[in-house]
Each structure stands twice: as structure tokens, then as C-alpha cells.
């Protein structure tokens, strides 16, 4: 056999071998849990991170295991939520974790739901509730659900509360200790 034809034949065999091995190692197809199909969503994002900034300064960040979005809405449904709020110097002001939540991308309001825990490290404060609302533009936080707050060795309980983000104007309804 002519050396030139032999080279072409070897190249052809190598190409077929490479192509057939590439077909055998197809990338796995990503699937969504069946429960997500019930949302009739336009998009599902896994491992979502959303940053709230003002004039280039990071104010808050939401990390969610799953974000469910609709084209005709500014609301985003979140699963396994971690919200972190930052001070102007970049230090962490508060952290809120919950099973699920809703983020309004227009107003930047967020509602955390299901085993909500908010930790404020600067003043040793922890608040636990089943629901917590956060409004950065209105500079307030509140819960219309029963809550327990631990602060500097004290335990406060109530049926609901409202507060500014600094906890200077903290109002408890249905309070008890």
C-alpha cells in the first residue's frame, strides 16, 4: 500500500475511534424534580446568587439553592435561602436563613419562610420565626408570626414584631418572656 494512502487510512480510523468514544461519553441530561413542573415557571435557576448594591457598594446578598422565575412577575420563589446584609464597611450586619422565600426584584423586598433564623452578630441577637419580612428601602424588618428573640442573655417572645434595621425602634405585639 502506498505510504500516503496508509497515512490517510490511519487518520480515518483514528477519527472514527475518537468520534465513537465521544458518543459513548455523552454529557448527562439535567432534570428538574417533578414538583418544580407544578410551578408553571418560565425559568428555574440552581445555585442562585443575587446581589443588592447601591452606588457600587454591596448592601446585601441572597443565595438560594433554587430560584423559580416567571417572565410576567418581579417575584422570584426561592428554596433553601441564605440572606446576608452588610454594613457600609463591608462587615456582615445580619444573616437570615430559611427553607424558602420570595424575592421581589423590583422593590428588593424579601420574605423568608419556614424555620427562619436571623443572627445579628454585632449585638449578640438571634430571632427565630416561621416568617420574616425584610425591606431594605424602607429600612425595616418585621414578622407577622410568633417569634423568639434571644438578646444579651434575655429571651423575648411575641406574636409579631416590627423594627427598623438598627433595632432602635423594636415593637413587640403579644409579648411575653
Image (cartoon, rainbow, N blue to C red):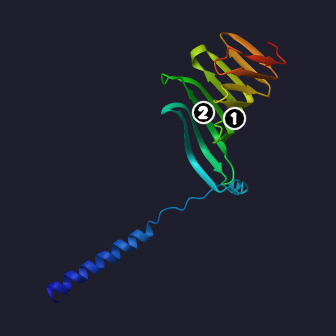
* Residue drawn where x is 60% and y is 41% of the image: 64
Task: Say which of 79 and 161 sits in front.
Answer: 161
Can you name the residue that lies furthest to the right here? 174
From the viewer's perspective, tell me whether residue 132 is left or right of residue 95: right
Residue 26 location, x and y as percent?
Answer: 46, 66
Task: Say which of 30 and 88 sits in front.
Answer: 88
From the viewer's perspective, tell me whether residue 41 is left or right of residue 48: right
Can you name the residue that lies furthest to the top here? 153
Residue 13, quarter of the rendered image: bottom left
Residue 137 location, x and y as percent?
Answer: 64, 30
Q: CA distance from mark 1 to mark 2?
A: 9 Å
* Residue pointed to by mark 1: 112
Can you name the residue that lies furthest to the front here? 55
* Residue drawn where x is 59% and y is 43% of the image: 65
Q: Residues within 10 Å of mark 2 (few under 14, many from 20)?
A: many
- The total number of labels drawn is 2
Quadrant, the N terminus: bottom left
* Residue drawn where x is 48% and y is 25% of the image: 90
Task: Say which of 51 and 45 sits in front.
Answer: 51
Residue 40, quarter of the rendered image: bottom right
Question: Which circle marks residue 48 in the picture?
Answer: none
Q: Secondary structure at mark 1?
A: strand
Report if the CB atoms under discs 1 and 2 are less than 8 Å apart. Answer: yes
Q: Residues within 10 Å of mark 1 (few under 14, many from 20)?
A: many
* Residue pointed to by mark 2: 83
Q: Earlier in the sequence, mark 1 or mark 2?
A: 2
Q: Is residue 96 above or below residue 29?
A: above
Residue 125 location, x and y as percent?
Answer: 64, 17
Residue 147 location, x and y as percent?
Answer: 76, 23
Task: Say which of 4 and 173 sits in front.
Answer: 173
Q: Secondary structure at mark 2?
A: strand
Amino acid at each position: 500500500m502506498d505510504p500516503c494512502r496508509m497515512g490517510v487510512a490511519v487518520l480515518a480510523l483514528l477519527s472514527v475511534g475518537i468520534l465513537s468514544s465521544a458518543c459513548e461519553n455523552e454529557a448527562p441530561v439535567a432534570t428538574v424534580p417533578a414538583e418544580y413542573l407544578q410551578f408553571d415557571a418560565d425559568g428555574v435557576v440552581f445555585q442562585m446568587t443575587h446581589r443588592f448594591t447601591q452606588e457600587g457598594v454591596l448592601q446585601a446578598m441572597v443565595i438560594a439553592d433554587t430560584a423559580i422565575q416567571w417572565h410576567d412577575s418581579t417575584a422570584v420563589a426561592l428554596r433553601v435561602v441564605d440572606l446576608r446584609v452588610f454594613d457600609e464597611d463591608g462587615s456582615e450586619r445580619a444573616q437570615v436563613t430559611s427553607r424558602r422565600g420570595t424575592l421581589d426584584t423590583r422593590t428588593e423586598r424579601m420574605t423568608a419562610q419556614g424555620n427562619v433564623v436571623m443572627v445579628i452578630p454585632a449585638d449578640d441577637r438571634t430571632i427565630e420565626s416561621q416568617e420574616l419580612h425584610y425591606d431594605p428601602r424602607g429600612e425595616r424588618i418585621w414578622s407577622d408570626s410568633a417569634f423568639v428573640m434571644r438578646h444579651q442573655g434575655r429571651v423575648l417572645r411575641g406574636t409579631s414584631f416590627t423594627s427598623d434595621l438598627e433595632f432602635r425602634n423594636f415593637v413587640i405585639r403579644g409579648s411575653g418572656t
